[in-house]
Structure formats: C-alpha cells, structure tokens
Amino acid sequence: MDLRVTRVPATADERSAVDAVLGEPESGWAGGERAAVDGHVAFGGLRRAEERRHLLLPALHALQDRVGWVSEGGLGYVCTRLDLAPAVAYGVASAYALLATEPAGQVVLHVCDDVACRAATGDPAPLLEANLGPTGGTGPVSWQPSPCLGYCEHGSAALVLRAGTDGGRATVAPFDVARQGELVALGDRLDVQALPTPLALVPQLERGDPSVRLLRRVGRVDVASIDAYRAAGGYEALRRAVELGPAGVIAELKDAKLLGRGGAAFPTGVKWETVARNPRRPHYVVANADESEPGTFKDRVLLEHDPFALVEALTIAGLTMGAEQGFLYLRGEYPLAEQRLTHAAEAARRRGLLGEDVMGSGLRFDLELRRGAGAYIAGEETALLNSIEGRRPEPRNKPPFPADHGLFDRPTGINNVETLLCVLDVLTGGSAAFASTGTPQSTGTRLFCLSGKVASPGLYEVPLGTSLRSLLEQAGGVADGRPLQAILLGGAAGGFVGPDELDLELSFEGARAAGATLGSGVVVVLDDTVDLTVLLRRIAQFFRDESCGQCVPCRVGTQRQEEVLARLLAGRAGGVLAGERALLADLDAVLRDASICGLGQTASAAVTSAVRRGLVAGLQEGS
Amino acid sequence: MFGAGGGTSSYEEIEHADLIVLWGSNAREAHPIFFHHLLKGLRNGAKMYAVDPRRTSSAQWADAWLGLDVGSDIALANTIAREIIHAGLVNTEFVARATTGFDEYAADVERWTLDEGERVTGVPAEVIAALAHDYARAGRAQLCWTLGITEHHTATDNVLALCNLSLLTGHVGRYGSGLVPLRGQNNVQGGGDMGALPNKFPGFQDVESEEIRAKFEARWGRTLHRERGWHLAQMFEAIERRELRALYVLGENPIDSEADTRRASAALGELDHLVVQDIFLTRTAELADVVLPASVSTFESDGTVTSSERRVQRTRRALALPGDAREDLDILCALAARLGHDWGRPTAEEVWDELRSLSPMHAGMSYRRLEELGGIQWPCWDEEHPGDKFLHGRLWAEPREGPPAPFFAVEWVPPIDELTDEFPMRLTTGRRLDSYNTGVQTGGYRSPLRRPETLDLSPEDMGRLGVKEGDVVRITSRRGAITAPVHADPALRPGLAFMTFHFPDETETNVLTRDDWDPKSGTAEFKATAIRVERLAAEVVG
Amino acid sequence: MTITSPTAADPTPVSLRRRIELSVDGQPVTVHEGDTLLDACRQVGVEVPTLCFLETLAPVNVCRVCVVEVEGSRTLVPSCSRKAEPGMSVQTASDRVRTSRRMVLELLASSVDLSLAGDDVQRWIAEYGARADRHGPAAAPAAAGERDRARPGHHHVGDGLSAATVHQPAKRDNELYQRDYSRCILCYKCVEACGEDAQNTFAIAVAGRGFDARISTEFDVGLPDSACVYCGNCIAVCPTGALMFTSEADLRAEGAWDEDRQQVTRTVCPYCGVGCNLELHVQDNTIVKVTSPLDHEVTSGNLCVKGRFGFQFAQARRAAD
C-alpha cells in the first residue's frame, strides 16, 4: 500500500522492541537494510497487509512497554513493518487506555477508583494527589485513576507499569496507605518484578467447603506444574472429549443444559454446534478473558490460580468446533494471569497437549494469548474480535453473528472463561451430574464476586438458584453489622437490589423475573454510609469513559446521562432541573433500544434501576 | 493487432478480475480514479503484479513488484511467454481457434530462458516465473499499461509483446480479461476516434482504402488525399528537411512537451508560418505568427470526449468565454470561411451527427442517448445498441468471427541512449499526482502537495554523490545539461533517477531527453536517458 | 454471437436474485435478496431519515437515526444495513422508533452544530420534536487541539449545568480544505471515502473513544504532514458541512455563497484519459465548487486532486482579462 509514514524516525530502542514481536524485517521495503535485490523486487499489497494487521496491538504493546508510550517514530516503524496507514494505527492506539499517545512517566500507577473499591474504601484521589501530584504527570512516577482492576475483594488496587528493558507490569492489591507510601518512597527505583503477588480471597476454600466445582483447585494445586494439574484431575476432560468426538461433546453440553455465563445465557451446545457445522473454513475459537465489568474478579482468580484449566477448556473448544487456532484474549490489567497462562500454554505444548497432534488425537490445535489494552468495550465479543484483528475495538452490528462471520470473517466460537470452565465440569462429572445442580433451567454452579461493605469479601461458588440472602449470609453479611442500603447486582451494567429483595433467586430465570440480571456475578454490598448518587455518577462516568463512541445513542447518551447525575449531585445544594426524570427515561429508551451493542444497551440499566427503586436523592417524587 | 485502437475492457471488469498486471503505469498518480476500480478489484480478492523500474505508489499495492531495468520490457514479456509455453500453460484451444503465427512466435521467444530474462531485466527469475504462472492460470486477467510502455523508441513492439501474452493465455475478448492502455489525456482516445491520426479517417477507417475514401469524398463533396500523412515526429523531420513550411498547432505545446526541447524549438523557428490555437500563450504560441485564442474545451464549449474504456461522453459549456477567445469550432468555421468555404456555423451536435453518419462505430451515439446512458462505449452500431463493455468477443465466438489475431514476434533492443562511464545513470520521467504534463493547467491551482522540480535519486546514490536533500546538482546528458535540486526517493534503486516535466519554466527536463522516436507510432523515448550527475560547489549554488 | 467464458459471468444482475416478501407498516413489499430494510421502506415510499448512510459507501450503521422496529427483535434495528428476510414485519413509526429517532436527533443537535446539515435534518428535528435545549445550555467551545488530546478512559467530570459539545475552532492548515469539527456528527463517511470504500489513502481515521471520539490524522498532524492527497472525496460525502472546500467556506464567510444563483453543469475532466464526470458549480461565471455525480459508474462521485481543484487555470484566464 502507498503509505506516508511519519517523518520522525524510530529510535534503535523502538525498533528493537517492535522487532522482538514482529521478527526481523524481511526486506529493505519492510524497514530493514536495503539490499541489491530490493531494487528489483518487492512483495507487498493488500492481502499481505491484511494478513499481518492482527499483529498491530502486540506491536503497540511492545512500544508502550519499552518506551512508555506509542511514540510517533515508533508508530511509524510499526506501520512500515505492517504496511498499515499511520492514521489507522493511531486510531487504534488512541482507543485504549493502557496505550499512551503522549509521553508519560517511566513508572505509571493506574489506581482503581471504581464502584467496588470506592464502596469499600472511598475515593483514592486525595491521598494520591498529596503523594504524587495531579494525575497524568510526566515525572518519573505518575498516577492516573483507573476503572475496575478486578481485585475488588481487596477493596483497593493499583496496576504498576514500568517502561523500559528493565520494566514490567504488576498489580498491587490491596493498595492501601502503607503500600502507597512504600511505592512513592521507591520512586523510579521501583522493581516491578519484586512486588509481592496479590492473593485471591476464596472464603469457601478456607472453610474447606466441598461443594465447589470450578474453584476446587484454586490455592491447592501448584499453578506452575502441569503434573500437579493432571494429578488434580486436569486433562481428564480433554481425554473424554477426544473419546466422545465433536458430536459427543456437543450432545453432552446440550444434555447438561449449559447456558453461557457471559451475559446472554445462550445455550453453549447450540453455539458450538452452529460453529462446528459451518462449512466455511478455517474455524477459530476464542476465550473471552477480557473481564472488565466493574466489581468482577472471578475470571482473574481462576486464571491466576488454575491457569491450565482454561488452556484445556479452549483446546476442547477447538477440537469440538473444528478450529486449529485459538485465541485467548486476556485483559491488559492482568499481568499475573498473563504470566501464568503463558507458562501453562508452553507446558501444554511441550507435553503434546497443544500443537500438531493434541493428546494423540491426530488433530491439530494451538492457541495464542492476546493482551487487551484497557478497553471495557473489548469484552463485547465482536469488539474483541476487532481488537484481535488490529482494528479499533468497536462492536459490529449483529447479525451476522460470530458463529457465521467471526474472527477474520470466519466461523468463530467465542466463549467467556467461566463458561469454558463449566465445559470441563460437564465433561469430567458428566452432563447428568451437571444438570442436577442448580435449577431445571439454570444448571450448574455460578461464581459470585462479593465486594464492598461485606464481612468476608471474595469469590463464591454456589449452585444456580441459591438466594441472594443465602449468598450474603455465606459472606458474613454486611460489614460491621451495618444496615444494608442496596446491592449492586451484575455489575455497572446490572442493577440495584434493595434490602427487601434479598429472596431473589440467583438463576437466569429468577433474575429475569425480578427485573434484575446476574451479569458477571457482581455483588457489591452497599451499606447505609455509601452515597448512592456519587456511586451512580461513577457508573455514569464509567460508561461515558468506556463507550467506543461509534453510535450516537451511546456516544452522546452516556455523556448526557453523566451530566444528569452531576446535576442531581449538585441539585442537593441548588435546584434540580425540571424534567430530569423524563430525560433519564428518554436516555434509557434510546440507549437500550438503539445502541449497537450491549454496552450502550445496558449503560443506563443501573441508573434506571436506582431511579425505579427510589434510591436516587431528588428523583423519588417523580419530578 | 486487433484492429481499432482502444482498450479492450471496461473499468468495471478490473473490479472482478482475479489477476491484475500493471505494466509501466503509475495509475495511482496518473489515473487515480481508474485506480479506484483497480482497488475494488484488490478488495474483491484480485492478485496484483506491478512492472515498473520504480516502486511507485501504484507498485506498492502489488503483491509483487518487478523492478525491471528501463527499456527491458520486451525481454521480460518474452521471458514470461517462454515460461508459459514451457510450463504447459498456453491456452491451446484459444491459440488454435483464434490466432496465427504461434509456432514462429514460440521459436522466437525460445532464447528467453528465465536466467536470460533475469540477466537482462534484473528481476529475479522466480518472480518472473510467478507472474507467468499466475497470469496464465488466472480465470480473469487484466493487463494494463501507460506511458512506461509507449514512451520508448520500441513503443509499438512493447505493446505487441504484451498483446502476445494475452493471445497466449486467452486473456482477451471476454468479460474480465483484457488489455487496457490508459490514455494520458482526456481525449487522446477521442482524437484517434475522430481521425486525428495520419492514416485514419474517423472511426479508425483507413485513408488508403478506396471504398472508405469514396464514402468520405461523397459526403464531403471533395477529393481527398490518397496517402497517409505524417505523425508528429515525421513532421519535425519534414520541417528540418524544409519540406514542411507551415504548421497549425491546436492545443499542443511541443516546445515543452517534446523530447529534446532545443531541437523542437529550433525546428519551429525554421517554419515560414506558424499558427497556434490555444487557451494560453504557451512557449510554442510565443513563437507563432498568429495566435488564435481558443476555449477550454471541457468548460467552455459543447462536444464529446472518449475515455480509456472507449466511453464517449458529453462535455458541456459551463462558463462564458473570456475576452476574444472563441470556441474551436467557431475558429475553424471562420477560418474555412476566410479560405473561401462557407461551412455556416453548425452546432457541436450537428457536427457530431455528421460524424455518426460516416463512422459506423459511433452511429448509435446520439446526444440524447449519450445523456441518458451516461456515455456509451464504442462500438455502438445503431440506436438500439448499448455499446460494448469489451472488445474482440468475436475471437471466442463459435465459429470465430472475422480474421484470427496474429502473434507478432518482437525483438528486444536496448535503449538507444547507452549507459557508459561518462553517462552512467539512467534517467526516467513521469508524472506526479497533482500535476499534469507541462503544468500549463495544473500550475493554475495551489496544490499543498506541490514541490518544485527535483532530480529524484535513490538514498544510496545521494550518499555516493555526497549530496543531501535540496542540494543542487548538474545533470548532463548527451544532449545538454540542466541543474536541479535533488530529492531522495526510496522508490528508486541505485543508478536510476527520475524527473517530471511539469515545470519547464524552472527546469527544462526535456533538454536532457532523447527524441529518437518509434518508427511505427511516432512516440519519443522519454523514458530512457543516460545521464551524469555532478555535485555543484556550494558557491555556484549561491 | 455466443461468448464462451471460462469463468463465472458478470456479477449477478438484480433480476436474478431471489425475491423476498415482507411488510412495512402493514404494507406488503417485495425486494431482492441482499436488499436492506431501507430499500424496502423506500420502495413503498416510507421516508426513513438517514445520516451516516450513502449509496456509494458500505453502511456503517452508526448514527442510528434510521432504526426501525422488527417484530420479534429485542432492540430496534438499523434499516440501512439490516438485510431483508422473508416474512419480516417492520414498523417505522411506532412509539419506540419515534422516541429513539427523536433522541438521536436531540443528542446530535445538542452537541453538534447542524446548521449546515441540510433542510431534511431541520425538518426531521421539527417532525420528531427533538429539543436540544432540554440538555441545558451548550458548554463553552474547546480550545484548538484540546479534544484531539483527550485521553481514552479519562475526562473531566463537570457539574452537568451545561451540555458538553464538540464545538472547537475550525482547522485550516492548507489552502484547499477547511475542517470544522464543530459540525462533525462522526458519521464515518469521510473515513470510509478516504479509506477502503474509495480512495484507500487512509489519511484520517476515528481516534479516541466515547464522547471524545473524533476524526483525526496520526497524532493530529496537519493535513500537509499527513497522507492526505487532497482528492476532496471526504468533503464530497460530508453531510454536515464539517468538511468544506476553502473556496466555499470563504464565500460563506463573506456571505456571498448563494446556491440559488449557482448553475451546475456536467462535463468531463480536462486531465487524464479516465473520463471522470465533473459537475461544475458556477456562480457569477466563476467555478465555486467541483463535484462528481454519485450515480455515474466511472467515478461514483469520486475525483482526484486535479479534477477537484485543477479548474483554476480557467478562472485565471478570466482574471487576466
């Protein structure tokens, strides 16, 4: 393609960082030294550029990791290597919060100030400003607020990013006053690799609860050892899948009545069958590990503490749906999970559990891990596919669905982490056992992330159909015995449940009947001290920040929703504008009905549910 | 080879091709909207090869670029042909039914082994073979070229060498496969259509045919010359022989546009009488005895032009004429009247209708239909005929219609201007996106892309010469010397330099170029000049 | 004469495609496979407002003003891109449809300057009862470059007492184009035209996200430093006057732009041999704008820099008089 690449040349450092991901340039035309033969032949063109475009995000990560931002020269070099227009690459880079398009400090702290941590420990900004100055500085150590980092059970967290060859990425959780002090004192001497690994809080395991299924290996099995994993029942499911063959696996999933845990509750067996039967080739499978819903940390716990399980499950998905290539899309805020999954995949490959002949089945399957870069929207399945392809993480209009036109426009089976791990459970325990757990319509167990003002925050696994009250009781109820004001159920895209609704049955049908959603299993407990309007404004801010901006309802609607919430907050001191309630209702209507994707369609859900339950100061009287 | 001169395909067809070969054409810059159609083809999955000494912006879209040495096109084409023959990829059915001369042709290209092709063209053998195989195997293949093929002293042979490839593979005469010469000017095709050729009446009808001539004589009531006329290069030779003494130039600026400017200028100065009809007082007009201020044909008068896909389209008057300027038709009629012939003042449509009555291939193209259909592609035999998307379908007809298409064996001859120690570099010329020819028209708008004329060099040659961007150098050819600043262009390899002739007032590029012309077409060798580049001492630059 | 073609024939003509029957607002309508709901609506004469749709570009379905209600569908669907299916029952004037269209228009009108977006848009705003003022007074315009530096995932949370807008100073970094992003509704047309749907130059793309999303070159460099080749094809498809030729912008600024006094004449470009149709917009015997017809198969509305701007030589002749 005829490109005009930015005239700022790349530094040697930038080139080596990019080359480390893309390999050495193949010719003088692709950024290497010009050889005599380059004067007489060159290979390029559209097809080649399209085939390499999926390497864009890894290359941008390489720049960010090395020099702390996506620099002009570095971006130009990436574009030369990939035959991609700089404006297009910039459009991609500028859509991700973890990629900077202006110079940043060497060490950047992304500090969670989202709903769960706020509910637990309040706004972290004042202390950080006192320690490190205002956000977005370019000094050696700077900080910026972050949406949920997925360590909600700790009540506070920071993602620490250090650029350079000696740099690294790690999460600090909890990120309390003492930890902040330590990090600030270290300044740019901070060694990211030496930071302590955060723990996972799974109270049921501490109590030795035998009923857990998905969590059974967490904290009990060496995460680095494939032998330990196999000794703990690992790869039994794959063995069974190879025996059963694709049709058998699909029949098991259908008999188990497994419903997708990602939000749409679509029958997994049907989805897999649709992909498996599609005559267009090749097929792809994708694990959606872009867990980003505020208040959600379930996938993180499983990925960090049972990493082989996802590798095994995605392998089963690949063999069943006829894919030879899988992608594991992991959110960029999970460096520990990335390390452990990378290790697990390598170990599996060495053992012949990935590669040319998976477990002697004669079938080929391998997977590649792709790191997200700070975009909640990339968790939407079609935006995720675009992200892998090196495009802006913008959702696609559906239909067509990924099962027909998915990754690289091919039939693609994309599943959430929890769903994939349930597949292991179905295959090892059998569909009958799986279906006998939960309710007749919502089979199996479900993970719930308890955070906020709860006595024992952490990850819980209960059969579907368990009541919210029972779950809350297992977690010791509201912290310090204070009165419950409300529960945020399902995440920022979920809704509120009042203290009088605790008998809600936690099943797909139970939630639907109550006008609620299980979402990603978020249970943020809010006691009477939490200012709900402040929390709602944070939720509105979240959607305003995370909207991809593609469609008008969401791009402008989330901005207007935040403005209404801001006015309501201000309204306590001054007058509330007339018609705010009608405005919120109209915004809710257009967001829900006319947005392209699930983000926009649920961006007003929490606010609407709060208004409906009379939880918003100033709007109770139907103004 | 096939009869009437025109592209065999429609732009639409390249959108549905499986393979596109762009040969000696930087369409991305010289024919941007044609390139849109080509891009649609790529987006629909077509594979593309580009053949060009420079890796132009067009060539960057190709799956593979073949950077042949300037003037080695016939060598490359013959090597491709031999490879197709030896790989058993000849479309034998088509060759048998629709062509003649295959055996002689095959014998002639036999010496063009891949190794010999690589030696002469510089292009690696395996890439030549890949093009040969892909072209022969493609379901639909488009072979497109521009001045990179025709601005050589072997212009006609270059074209024949490409046509041979289409005969060998059957890539002509059917939807999606064809030969597309892209015309450099908006009515080059139309000029030919209208008989502005030394040997043709309108509609490509032969002036030497008694029957044809009789038709025109009857319609015009005059006896017409029996012999063909001169083409442009022959005219200049005739001036130099003092055989041609008066010249009437309409809308041309040969002093700036002819290869070897000094020779052209001297020749025009020798004339007894020079009339120039133009919209500008060009350098040629400055030499004229009489200047007739004309109209901008596409903005200030009604008429038709014909595009590279043989589409005849209406032009319309949008602006009133400035000053004393008059429409070309007006001037011609007035001139006829002064010469004692009262042609009246026909409208453009009336002239067109006369043309339609004499040129069968335009017969069905009434103004009304041209309007309704957005132009019509010739041939259009009558007012029911929709025009033809592609030509030579007759070759595939069962049984074949008309005469078979002959192969023409053509020999490679290197460029006349040899590279020697004294003139070691090859200069080639071309266009830039925002400029056009001698800049008479494009000089009128302020393009943010425009930069002054430069000698474009490879970064390696810049280093070897010890010059940096913008340094002024002296460029010397066997005909003259000029100075120009240098510009680094990685599209060039060492030993290859590039200039345009968009800015003749500042940089007379055509002082350097050769006017050796192709005896068959009269096109001059703009594309292959031997030069020497010397750095100027800083004080000389001032 | 019979043609033996070894490969597939021309692209399937419309007449050979399968017929699909559905209903629009209760009226039966028959379209062809591959046609959209918008095609179906237009066929029965039902007006559907569109902003980001253009016949020559692949539908991006982002503005959502063309949404319709399809029986059985959880959400409304964009008629511009949704393919017609047999038996579909489409409603174009239900309360849900009208509410969403009203809100889309209201959200745009409250955040973007739509004053040059055309009479249809003004009429739709009135018809649907969109009220931009409900969202409060417009916030002060951003400083030059401020919106271009917005970082994804971060923004200043205001007090909500004024409505955020995209207003900002117009960008003018070359002699041919003006980019006034205060008027940009982010319909993606310019990006599509500069990109894969036509020009394939990719000088611009959507950058940033959410309310900060914008059309941008890499790092917001000026057009002369970008890949822009000044074909003007972005300007030709811009529906709101955000992208404008300086010749038009200057006349508008002087109050001299008067479309009622303009004559549009179709002719052929005076440059290369491709044969692009030009529409010369002439006011007072001066060419003030050059466009190309969307429905002409040679250009599909596109031109190159010479065709679009290379007419000046004709004017210069007049100036010299």
Image: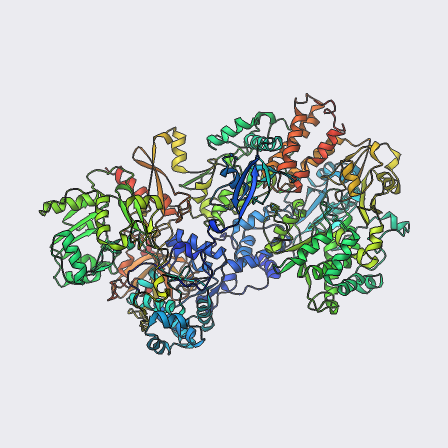
What is the residue that sits farthest to the left in this orientation? B340
Residue B489 sits in quarter: bottom left
Location of residue C60 in the rendering, given as x and y in whole percent from the top left corner: 54, 44
Location of residue C254 in the rendering, given as x and y in whole percent from the top left corner: 38, 29
Q: How is the image coloured?
A: rainbow
Closer to the camera in the image, A582 or C3: C3
Q: Residue at x 91, y 49 (%)?
A: A207
Closer to the camera in the image, A205 or B510: A205
Q: Residue at x 76, y 29 (%)?
A: A615
The total number of labels drawn is 0
Location of residue A68 in the rendering, given as x and y in whole percent from the top left corner: 63, 51
Q: Name above or below for residue A572 compared with residue C170.
A: above
Does residue A218 show up?
no
Closer to the camera in the image, B209 or B288: B209
Does residue A22 show up?
yes
Closer to the camera in the image, B203 or A361: B203
Q: Quadrant of the C terminus of chain A?
A: top right
Residue B381 sits in quarter: bottom left
Image side of residue B211 versus residue A273, left or right: left
Image side of residue B443 versus residue C130, left or right: left
Location of residue A510 in the rendering, given as x and y in whole percent from the top left corner: 80, 40
